[in-house]
């Protein structure tokens, strides 16, 4: 079996517009740390909803995320916690994304709990509240405009 070809992630200018949210979902047997990634709406002259969607697809491909309507694939060890600070290795050899996580999220990850990463392709305003984010996830799921996968802390 051959290893999949490495996908190039979007550049740092694009990644700077990605918004991250974390939470803990209490599964029936064990908690799952969740990481949601979406992009802010177009703000620069060279950005559009389509270019943001393409960039988020490239971000999801670099993470080896799978289709939303199948089981979330294991994507390798993409989460690191160093000195209590969690970050995501998104495929850029030099850059990492710091994660905005509560201690409860870090606790789940540090003891070996799974991290479910969900990347949405459609942009959403950075100031959106929980209700708006939940509705946006439902809409993206219904349209197939998202990818997901499972990782663990290494």
Image (cartoon, grey):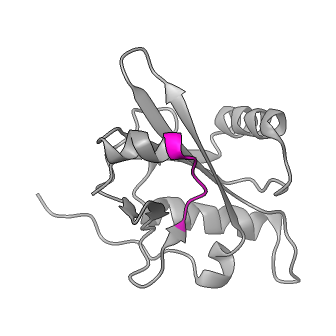
Identified at 65% across, 46% down, the residue is: 145
Identified at 88% across, 83% down, the residue is: 45
Residue 102: say if magenta.
yes
Residue 63, x across and y down, in percent: 43, 61
Residue 12: say if magenta.
no
Residue 126, x across and y down, in percent: 81, 57
Find residue 18 and report its image quarter.
Answer: bottom right
Over which residues does the magenta segment extend?
98-104
**Can residue 149 be seen in this snapshot?**
no
**Can residue 13 be seen in this snapshot?**
yes
Direction from residue 60 to residue 53 in the image, left or right: right
Identified at 30% across, 57% down, the residue is: 77
Q: Is residue 110 above or below residue 83?
A: above
Residue 80, x across and y down, in percent: 37, 62
Quadrant in the picture for the N terminus: bottom left
Task: Tell which of 51 and 128 is nearer to you.
Answer: 128
Q: Is residue 5 above or below residue 23?
A: below
Direction from residue 45 to residue 22 in the image, left or right: left
Of all residues shown, which one is farthest toward the top? 28
Find residue 42 and report its image quarter.
Answer: bottom right
Task: Tell which of 1 and 90 is nearer to you.
Answer: 90
Identified at 62% across, 40% down, the residue is: 144
Task: Tell which of 19 and 107 is nearer to you.
Answer: 107
Residue 60, x across and y down, in percent: 51, 59
């Amino acid at each position: 079996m051959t290893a999949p070809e490495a996908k190039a992630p979007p550049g740092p200018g694009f990644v700077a517009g990605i918004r991250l949210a974390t939470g803990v979902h209490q599964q029936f047997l064990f908690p799952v740390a969740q990481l949601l990634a979406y992009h802010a709406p177009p703000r620069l002259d060279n950005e559009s909803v389509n270019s943001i969607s393409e960039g988020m697809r490239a971000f999801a491909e670099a993470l080896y995320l799978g289709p939303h309507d199948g089981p979330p694939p294991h994507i390798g060890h993409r989460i690191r916690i160093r000195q209590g600070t969690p970050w995501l290795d998104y495929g850029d050899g030099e850059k990492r994304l710091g994660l905005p996580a509560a201690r409860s999220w870090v606790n789940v990850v540090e003891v070996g709990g799974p991290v479910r990463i969900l990347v949405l392709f459609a942009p959403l305003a950075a100031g959106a509240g929980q209700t708006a984010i939940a509705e946006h996830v439902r809409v993206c799921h219904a349209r197939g405009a998202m990818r997901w996968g499972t990782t663990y802390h290494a």
